[in-house]
Image (cartoon, rainbow, N blue to C red):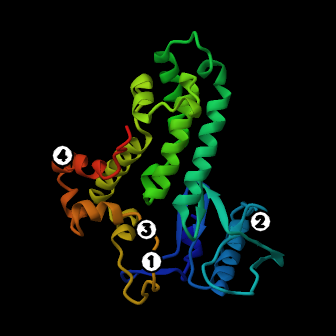
Amino acid sequence: MIFRKADLEHGLNVDGETLTNLRFADNVALITENIENMEEQLNVLNNISLESGLKMHKGKTKYMNNFESNKDITIDKEKIEKVESYKYLGQTTYLKDTTKEEVTCRIRAGWSCFRRNREIFLDDKMPISLKRQVYDQCVPTMTYRCQTWSLTKATTQKLRVAQRAMERKIRGIKLADRVKCCEIRKRTQIQDIVDFVAKQKWKWAGHVARLKDNRWTLRVTEWQPRNDKRSRGRQARRWRDDIVKTKGNTWSRDARDRDKWKRDAEGYILQWMDRAS
């Protein structure tokens, strides 16, 4: 009701339609092309919220921008903090290399979960089958929202290094023992974490491509900005780049055939296969 009253005007032009905001429950992200428009829309939203009996939490309201600006944003003469990252819906959002930083946070969370269960993992008398079941509860912590990651060799290597370290601790193997990774994997029988991530991303890509309700998820994924050009030099990996590498630019059309998309999953996963395992 508040957003219908607000009727926000400023946003990002996506194929002729303006994307002004993204909402999930009471979590809101506003999008504009400059600081002045953002300040205007925040104040409009704040005023209409007050009229409806709701108060904006200014302490949790932050803003990020990917261009140089010395101007501050204020709401009711209260300055809003500018940040380089923000945790939104459980995932830390950056305007630069999101995946690299997010993977680091996920690995840290995975180790935290691992340490909470160290009495099980480090118990020599505990059967490996039980340790494997407990470890499987750590994996969702490390791969939360992995469907949205832009996979690169660097990020997948970070995930595998963390997983191998956990596997060595589970089996009581030290680096000085010089046991090969493939041998450790035979002993633990744990699924490779990158294979799991690749499968989840492939399934999600198919789901997005088959959306039929004109939602922003698909439209922004397929969006090709016409006025802006990418900068010179090596480009950051985009979410769809590794999928395009496997299926080409027509991947979203191919993904609409659910059965064929499932059959094609193997080719995508193979590019991330751990040769050492």
Q: Residue drawn 61% across and 85% down?
A: 34
Tag nearer the camera, 3 or 1: 1
Q: What element carries label 2?
A: loop
Q: Residue 263 carries which label?
A: 4
Residue 91 seen in the current view:
yes
Q: Distance between the residues labelled 3 and 4?
A: 25 Å
What residue sits right under mark 1 in the picture? 234
Q: Do the residues labelled 2 and 4 touch (CB within 8 Å)?
A: no
Is 55 displayed left or right of 24 in the figure? right
Q: Residue drawn 49% across and 29% down?
A: 136
For badge 3, the amino acid type reads Arg
Q: How far apart are marks 4 and 1 (CA)?
A: 32 Å
Tell which circle, 3 or 2, labels the residue nearer the N-terminal end.
Answer: 2
Q: How far apart are marks 3 and 1 (CA)?
A: 9 Å
Q: Residue 58 carries which label?
A: 2
Residue 107 in the image: x percent, y percent?
58, 45
Q: Is mark 1 on a helix, strand or loop?
A: loop
Residue 10 in the image: x percent, y percent?
55, 83
Residue 256 in the image: x percent, y percent?
20, 56
Is 228 displayed left or right of 106 in the figure? left
Q: Is residue 203 above or below residue 250?
A: above
Tag nearer the camera, 2 or 1: 1
Q: What element carries label 4?
A: helix
Q: In this view, does 133 lie above or below 34?
A: above
What residue sits right under mark 3 in the picture? 237
